[in-house]
Amino acid sequence: MTESTGHEPDPTSAAKQKDVPLGPACMVVFIFFLVALCVLVAFMSFMLTGKQGGRAAYAVREQLIPWVDQSSLSQPDQVAIIDELTSLASQMERDELTSRQLTRLGARLQDSTILQWGVVEEINRAAQRTKGLTEQEKSDFALACDRWLRAAGEGKLSMIEMEFAFQSIATKEPRSGRLTLKESISDEQLREFYRRVLSICEKYKVPSEPFDKSVSQVFKAMIEDGLAEK
């Protein structure tokens, strides 16, 4: 038999040596993870902010300008609005606009009722041509369209309200969102359109005197308001 040395290993002591606490190590890893995540978020934010003007300019040149060019707006208004958009895109490309200005412009340009105004001019011409409306009705119709343009210029007319007024006499293209008049429109449909436009004007208490600004002038004022730092 072998003799005991008197220094046999203590099982409890060995277990304690093996059970190294993992809490501090996990905390260090977690802190490093948070730091890396913060750096990544800051980097992505910088990249997005840095390219914001370029992306906006691309959208204006490749989407908005062609949309206006193919619209039913009058030729003078088309030219003036496209010139305004071209100048705006150049400012965006040169990073001359702040994030706030880009945000304000985006809110005004997205689903803009003013850029849809060609369809309003078309329906007004249809009303003036028909023999089924009296001269007084034609005059009232034109005045209501003027008041509606004022409401749009003041940012009061929403796209939902515009589509409601055109509900029975126009279709909306799925991809472009463009409103297009139907080929056949009755005199009663013209009267219903007039009543809806008039109700919207009354809702916003739009003045009843003639509005002497063109669509392009209203559009320019909208852009200037978007660029104003308020």
Image: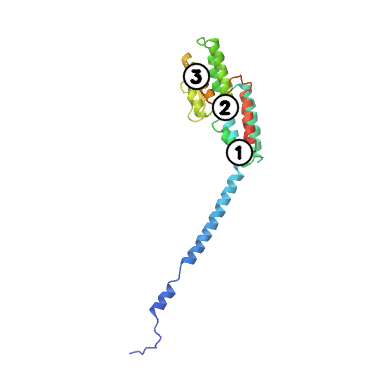
Residue nearest the observer in this picture, 160 or 33? 160
Return the mark for residue 195.
3
Q: Earlier in the sequence, mark 3 or mark 2?
A: 2
Image quadrant containing the C terminus:
top right
Return the mark for residue 102.
1
Q: Does the rendering let one see residue 12?
A: yes
Residue that badge 2 annotates: 152
Q: Disc count in the image? A: 3
Q: Give coordinates of residue 168: x percent, y percent.
A: 46, 21
The answer to whether 149 is drawn above or below residue 8 in the figure is above
Residue nearest the observer in this picture, 187 or 93? 187
Question: In the picture, residue 116 is in which quadrant?
Answer: top right
- Which residue sits at x=38%, y=78%? 11
Cα–Cα span, label 1 and label 3: 37 Å
Q: Give coordinates of residue 197: x percent, y percent.
A: 52, 21
Q: What SS does tag 2 mark?
A: helix
Q: Earlier in the sequence, mark 1 or mark 3?
A: 1
Residue type, label 1: Leu
Question: In the picture, residue 152 is in which quadrant?
Answer: top right
Callout 3 touching callout 2 (CB < 8 Å): no
Depth check, mark 2 against mark 1: the one in front is 2
The answer to whether 131 is drawn above or below residue 214 in the figure is above
Depth check, mark 3 against mark 2: the one in front is 3
- Which residue sits at x=55%, y=15%? 140
